[in-house]
Every structure is written in C-alpha cells, then in structure tokens.
Image (spheres, grey):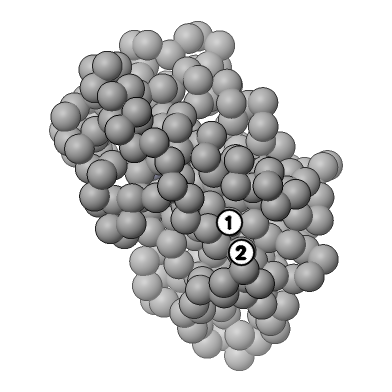
Amino acid sequence: MTRGDSAGPRLGLVADVHANLQALEAALAWLDARGVDDVWCLGDVVGYGGDPEACVALVRERCAGTVRGNHDAAVVDPSLLSWFNPHARQAAQRHAEILSADAKAWLDGLPWTLDLGEVALVHAGFADPPAFDYVLNARQAAVELAAQPARWGFVGHTHVPGAWRRGEDGAVERLSLQGGDEGIDVDLPGKVLVNPGAVGQPRDRDPRAACALLDTRTRTLLHARVDYDIAAAQAAARGAGMPAIEAERLASGM
Ligand code: ZN
C-alpha cells in the first residue's frame, strides 16, 4: 500500500480506459467541468482499443495515481495472456508490439492498490488483487468489502457500474448510482464499494463513457455517462489492427 499525497476533496475516478482516447478525453472533460481536484485511475489503461500509447501518456499526465489492471499486466507479462479470450489476447499482443519501452516500463511499475486514507483503490478486488476477481453481485461485493481497507473503495474490471454498502452489522446491500445532479449520499455507516463502470469499453448496453466524482466534503458521489465520438474510437481501433469485434462492440456498449 502506498499513501497518496495529493488526495483532494473532489476526486475523479476513471476505470478501464482500454486505449480509447476519445472516451478518456470526454470523461476528463466532464470531470474538469465539475472542478475535480485529482483524478485516479482504476487500471486497464491498455488492451482492446486503438490508442494505447496516447492513453498511457494522458493517464500519466492527468492522473495522480493508477493501479495495475489485468490488461496492463498482460502487455508486459505474456504468461498472463492465457487468461484471456482469443480476441482480447490478440489485442494485448498487438499492444505489446506497438507500445514504447517507456510506456511498458510504467505499466510494469503500477501498484496493486492505492490507499488514500478514506479512499482505497484496486482494479478488481481487495481480498486478492492479483486474482482479478469480479464483483457483479452482493455476494461477491461482501468478500471485497470485508477486505476493503478504507471507508470508500473503488474498483473497475467488470466494465459494469455498481455500488454496494456493508453495514456495521456486516450485511451487504446494493446501492443505486442514480442521484441526478446532486449525486448519491455516501456518508453512510459502514463501508461503500463503487465500480464507476468503464471509460473505454462499457458492457452494460450503454455505450457512453462512464466515470465518477467523489466529493469528500459533501460526502456525495456523482456517477456520469458521457457521450463521445464512438466512430473515431472505432476507426482508431481498426487502424491499429485490433480485432474487428473490439471496434464493433463500442457502438452497443457490450
Ligand atoms: Zn478492463
């Protein structure tokens, strides 16, 4: 665990950028328009999309910290590719070919977790970060919330937005992320675990880029879906030699 020095009161969270530069720029613009202090990245900067080098550069420039995703790990450690389906593997291998040595060295140095005090970040799950477990339901969320070292935890990995709370009695409930312009109240007893959803490859049938803004002063969380130039991202993916499915799926959000 490392402690972030620059955790500001309004924290932006971006997950699963997946080399989609158009989506990342749109999500950052949305966060900037709301006066974000620091942006934190929940991993999977690369994999699937057309602009891995530019996305690594923009995340390095804009994010105060980034945790290690399974695609970030796989482009520097080919032994991990056996976990991937054939088109994900093909995309990661292509990224390994085209990424600069400097970008790969940065990816190779990403931490498993970041501990910002009231906030903790991990790509998949706190219980066993290198296992890259999935949190899609309350049963899986309960495992991660039990291990979560901070009041508010953030994960990515599933590409599906979700939020869960573990009460002081240990019971876990799903929270709605629908809070409108006010956001949802996260000043709740116990711990809250949030997946903001994917910036660059949503899989909840909403193709817009997803991100979140935690305001630690008002104790509220805003969840956003942001329109971006999907056709340009698809053209970039095709131009970089990604499997056709990785461009096509951006239009359906699956
Ligand atoms: Zn991912």
- Residue marked by disc 1: 212
Of all residues shown, which one is farthest toward the bottom? 169
The span from disc 2 to disc 1 (Cα, nearest Å) is 6 Å
Q: Residue at x 48, y 50 (%)?
A: 226
Where residue 13 appears, as percent x and y from the top left, is 60, 50
Q: Circle 2 sits on which residue?
A: 222
Give the residue displayed 39% in from the left and 76% down from the top.
139
Circle 2: element type:
strand
**Pointers 2 and 1 in contact (C-beta within 8 Å):** yes
Left or right of residue 109, residue 92 in this image: left
Q: Residue at x 54, y 43 (%)?
A: 27
Q: Amino acid at mark 2?
A: Leu
> In this orientation, does residue 113 appear?
no
Of callouts 2 and 1, the N-terminal one: 1
Q: Residues within 10 Å of mark 1 (few under 14, many from 20)?
A: many
Question: Which residue type carries mark 1?
Answer: Ala
Rendered position, 215 above or below 231? below
Along the horizontal axis of the image, is 87 left or right of 144? left
